[in-house]
Image (spheres, rainbow, N blue to C red):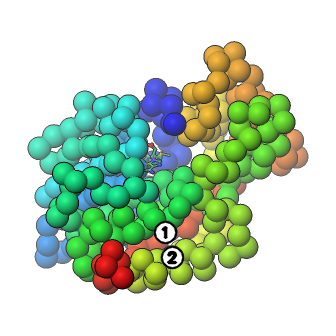
Amino acid sequence: MHNVELYTKNNYYQKFIARRFYNFFGDFLKTEYESQEISLIDVGSGCGTILSEVTVGESGLKFAKVLGIDISDKMVKFSNETYGSELMSFRYMDAMASIPDDFSGVQFNMATSFNVFHFFNDLKKALKTINDLMVVNGTLGCVFFIWHRYLDAWDALIEKYPIMTNWRSHFTPLSLVDNPDEVLKKYLKETGFEIVEFIDVKNEVYNCVLPENMANTLDAVNPFFTMMSEEQQQQFSKDQISKIFELQGSDSLVEPFRNIYFIARKVHSCSTD
Ligand SMILES: C[S@@+](CC[C@H](N)C(=O)[O-])C[C@H]1O[C@@H](n2cnc3c(N)ncnc32)[C@H](O)[C@@H]1O
């Protein structure tokens, strides 16, 4: 589970990525929704900051209704208390499970998911659920990573931190295949989506500026961090940074990663297929 306290204070990287998404696709989306009000569902909305500040606050899109869903009750509580309004609300939902009964019939004409798909170990199931939540012709806009240097560091730390042994089972298998872009395109097609924009950025970087920023950013999204004792957490944070420096052969705080950004249109429902 994500660490809400750390995440609310350390989501600069996620904000940077969401802004890149709108730099790539903002004009397309403005044209797409020029003559209709947007009802948006944001999948894995976290603490709500990126949804509130970037999507609603900066994108230039006009929203009539915004719902953020997240699997973490703590994230949902924080975002409702901090950003809840007549326009925007948040609720618990597991995107890899079926749609809850009190949801049935509600559909959205736009869906977004930023920095979340890499946590789906069954991406196809999540895409089916998202399809069910959308109207035909609605668009799904996503960005997620395929690889980050810190994943290699986690692999190398398993022996010292057995609690991390199964970390890969919490992550997308797309990070293990040679052609993640092709697999994703196949999943989208099989779940009723047609790709309208697709960017696979194989070499991106983010400058963490300070070692503590790098440690906090990584610890905030490590599902195993909250399961460690305070002492273990402190040691793990240090070991993680040392391992990253060792793997890259320098003390650089410029973190390399590979992201996929896309927009897909729902062309048909897949629940009856
Ligand atoms: C890195 S955070 C990103 C939050 C937000 N989208 C942002 O960009 O700041 C990933 C979020 O996905 C949520 N999440 C992970 N698995 C999920 C699932 N199966 N269903 C819904 N949310 C999930 C986590 O609880 C976490 O809040």
Mark 1–mark 2 contact, CB under 8 Å? yes
Q: Nearer the viewer, residue 74 or 145?
A: 74
First-in-chain label (1 vs 2): 1
Residue type (three-letter) at the residue carrying disc 1: Lys
Q: Which residue is mark 2?
A: 187
Residue 258 lies left or right of residue 73; in this view the side is right
Q: Residue at x 14, y 67 (%)?
A: 37
Could you tell me which secondary element the residue under label 1 belongs to? Answer: helix
Is label 1 within 8 A of ligand 1 (CB to nearest ligand atom)? no
Task: Say if 82 sits above or below 264 in the image.
Answer: above
Q: Where residue 98 sits: x, y (%)?
A: 35, 58
Give me the C-alpha separation between circle 1 and circle 2.
Answer: 6 Å
Task: Say if 214 sits above or below 178 in the image.
Answer: above
Task: Say if 205 sits above or below 229 in the image.
Answer: below
Counting other residues with Cα less than 10 Å from the Cα at mark 1, is it few (<14), some (14-19), or many (20 or more)? Answer: some
Residue 50 lies left or right of residue 110; in this view the side is right
Residue 124, label in figure: 1
Q: Where residue 222 sits: x, y (%)?
A: 60, 38
Q: Residue at x 53, y 79 (%)?
A: 185
